[in-house]
Image: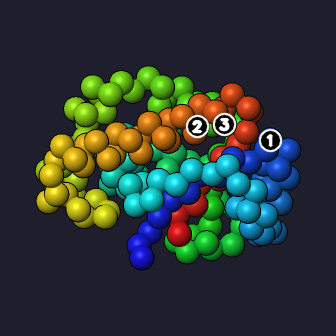
Amino acid sequence: MGMICHLYPVKAEDARRLLEALDQAEDVGPLLDAGGYTSLEKSWHGLHFTLTGEEWGEDGPRAFLLAGGEPVGDDLGYGPGRLLEPEEVAQVANALAAITDAEFAQRFDVQQLADREIYPQIWDEDPAALLDEYRSYFHQMRTFMHEAARRGDGVLVVIS
């Protein structure tokens, strides 16, 4: 199977409730069943690296897939989900909107992805096809975050 990433919209009032109950490991299952999510499949690590230049770390809105938000709920496969508050979602949406297709293509370095052993380690495939695939996931993610920010939603990032 493998590790896949889903982004779930979370209404502002639900985000506040979850953050107020962090120490209670509240079940986030109902949020996952609400629909409206987007799946980044196995592209999450390659997207993170392309956006930040770092394998795992980094701060700031471009690092939201691996470093953003607060851990909430139970372990969903590879740790708990991480909840981004509406304000953080707006920052992420603005940061992603500022990245042009040309900048994304320049940052998407298949050799570095391979050298750094970025998941899912498919970097021996056709570089042009990989760029198209990852640019498509980037557009999907950017649109999702823009729409969540427009609605004033939080976002739950789940890698499972």
Q: Give the image location of residue 86, x and y in percent.
A: 71, 37
Q: Secondary structure at mark 2?
A: helix
CB-based contact (under 8 Å), mark 2 and mark 1:
no
Is 10 left or right of 119, judged from the image as shown?
right
Residue sitting at 74 percent across and 48 percent down? 10
CB-based contact (under 8 Å), mark 3 and mark 1:
no
Task: Pick whichever, 5 or 16, lies toward us.
Answer: 5
Task: Pick whichever, 136 or 88, lies toward us.
Answer: 136
| Residue where numbered disc 2 is placed | 145
| Residue where numbered disc 3 is placed | 148
Q: Give the image location of residue 101, x and y in percent.
A: 32, 28
Q: Secondary structure at mark 3?
A: helix
Q: How many marks?
A: 3
Whether residue 60 can be seen here: no
Q: Amino acid at mark 2?
A: Met
Task: Pick whichever, 86 or 160, lies toward us.
Answer: 160
Q: Mark 3 or 1 closer to N-term?
A: 1
Whether residue 138 can be seen here: yes
Q: Give the image location of residue 56, x and y in percent.
A: 38, 56
CB-based contact (under 8 Å), mark 2 and mark 3:
yes
Is 119 left or right of 8, judged from the image as shown?
left
Looking at the rendering, which quadrant does residue 42 occupy?
A: bottom left
| Residue where numbered disc 1 is placed | 12
Looking at the rendering, which quadrant does residue 132 occupy?
A: top left
Q: Amino acid at mark 3?
A: Ala
Looking at the rendering, which quadrant does residue 88 occupy?
A: top right
Residue sitting at 50 percent across and 59 percent down? 5
Residue sitting at 23 percent across and 62 percent down? 122
